[in-house]
Amino acid sequence: MHEDFTKLFKSMMEQGQEMVRAFNPALENLSVKGMETFIPTMTKDMMEMWFGKTFNREGLDAKTRLLVTIAALTVLGAHAEPQLKLAVRHALEAGATQREIAEVIWQMSMFGGLPAMQKALEMAQAVFAETEEKAP
């Protein structure tokens, strides 16, 4: 059982590092220990936010949460390219179809404008192509 936990923990750490690189590469060199002195509850609060009640609340399933995230990131435009690509990948893994993702992005043209929608669709299409290449 200990070996299974070790593998799980290692996998979680690798995924966390991948997320950091995708969201903001500069965070890879951030020293959390220094921040804990300034904000003692930061580690606990961040873990609760990422893996606790914020993203695992009842009411919306993972697919819906990811589609909402894609909508928000689309409106942000080019500022959120790595985050949008990651959200599209995770949405596909959570069962969203390419059509559903494209519809969500298209809907955001009213809020973020056509350039933001076009850029988001291009990024989504790149992710679609990547996932189709990897499929057996």
Image: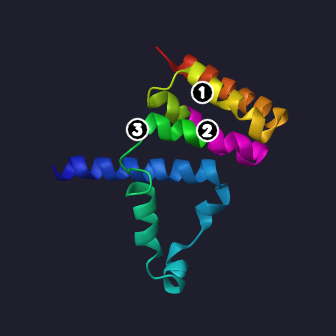
Q: Position of residue 12 (x, y in %)?
A: 39, 50
* N-term mark: 3 or 1: 3
**Location of residue 127 in the rendering, given as x and y in whole percent from the top left corner:** 63, 27
Badge 2 amino acid: Ile
10 Å crowding of disc 2: few (<14), some (14-19), many (20+): many
Q: What element carries label 3?
A: loop
Query: Tag 1, which secondary structure?
Result: helix
Look at the numbered discs 3 and 2 and tell me whether their residues touch, using CB distance below 8 Å.
Answer: no
Give the alpha-carbon distance from disc 3 to disc 2, as whole Å: 14 Å
N-term mark: 3 or 2: 3
The dot on residue 127 is: none
Q: Residue lying at the far left in this picture: please name it.
A: 1
Q: Residue 101 carries which label?
A: 1
Residue 103 placed where, x, y %? 64, 24
Label 3 to label 1: alpha-carbon separation? 15 Å
- Residue 122 higher or lower than 6, as above or below: above
- Indicate the amino acid at tag 3: Asp
Q: Identify the image quadrant of residue 78.
A: top right
Residue drawn at 54 percent across, 85 percent down? 38
Which circle marks residue 70 in the picture?
A: 2
Q: In this view, does 6 lie to the left or right of 101?
A: left
| CB under 8 Å between discs 1 and 2 | yes
Q: Assign the magenta stretch its main secondary structure.
A: helix
Vertical side of 8 occupied by 105: above or below: above
On the image, which quarter does residue 86 sit in?
Answer: top right
Q: In this view, does 7 lie to the left or right of 133?
A: left
Colour convention of the picture = rainbow
Residue on which disc 3 sits: 61
* Segment colored magenta: 71-88
